[in-house]
């Protein structure tokens, strides 16, 4: 150790007083006494630890980028042929079915003959869409994309819905 620098002795003294033991260091399968580790060896150990951490960071960044790519607006259209809506609640799951990604927004037209109710991602808040009404819904700045749609009409009523999603 460098005799000009009192810090190593101070640290070693405090560690002994607190009964802290430095773990043994293993280099190339050989155990090295921590006191015998030279400055250059310590730097090499630190470098190899940083290299290992960097490898993990690269993997994490790649996974994060893949997730962002899935959530990024692709500029594609998902046209749905007219959907027959009845008084039975229907679910359209965009995550588990094609296109396997949520929509950023959609445009829909209720061709009637009756009013229909549409829920986005849940059935708690239903949007009323009257016969011959057109709606444009955007989740561009929402925390969550449109992953599921719930559709139904009042008891005994029916409607035909045309819808085009964007993802």
Image (cartoon, helix red, strand yellow):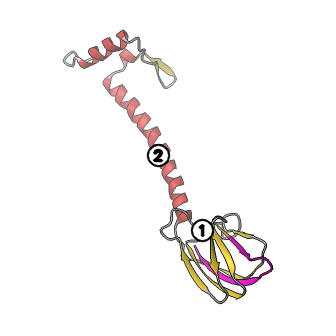
Q: Is residue 26 above or below residue 87?
A: above
Q: Is residue 163 magenta?
A: yes
Front in this rendered view, residue 60 or 33 = 60
Q: Is residue 42 left or right of residue 104?
A: left
Of the numbered discs 1 and 2, the one sitting upstream in the chain is 2
Q: Is residue 14 left or right of residue 97?
A: left
Q: Residue 69, image x and y in percent? A: 53, 63
Q: Is the stretch drawn in magenta largely helix, strand or loop?
A: strand
Q: Which residue is mark 1?
A: 146
Instruction: Provide the residue span drawn in magenta.
Output: 150-167
Query: What residue is rendered at 77% in x and 82% in y?
Result: 158
Query: What residue is rendered at 67% in x and 66% in y?
Result: 123
Q: Is residue 20 above or below residue 133?
A: above
State the CA–CA distance, disc 1 to disc 2: 31 Å
Secondary structure of the residue carrying numbered label 1: loop
Q: Residue 126, image x and y in percent? A: 64, 71
Q: Is residue 113 left or right of residue 35?
A: right
């Amino acid at each position: 150790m460098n005799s000009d620098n009192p810090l190593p002795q101070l640290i070693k003294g405090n560690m002994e007083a607190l009964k802290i033991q430095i773990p043994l260091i293993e280099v190339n399968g050989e155990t090295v006494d921590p006191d015998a580790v030279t400055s250059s060896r310590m730097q090499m150990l630190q470098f190899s630890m940083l290299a290992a951490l960097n490898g993990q960071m690269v993997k994490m960044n790649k996974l994060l980028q893949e997730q962002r790519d899935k959530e990024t607006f692709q500029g594609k259209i998902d046209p749905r042929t007219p959907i027959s809506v009845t008084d039975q609640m229907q679910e359209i799951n965009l995550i588990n079915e094609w296109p396997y990604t949520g929509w950023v927004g959609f445009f829909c037209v209720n061709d009637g003959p009756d009013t229909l109710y549409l829920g986005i991602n849940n059935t708690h808040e239903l949007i009323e869409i009257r016969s011959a009404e057109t709606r444009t819904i955007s989740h561009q700045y929402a925390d969550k994309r449109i992953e599921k749609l719930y559709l139904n009409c009042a008891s005994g009523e029916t409607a035909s819905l045309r819808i085009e999603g964007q993802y």
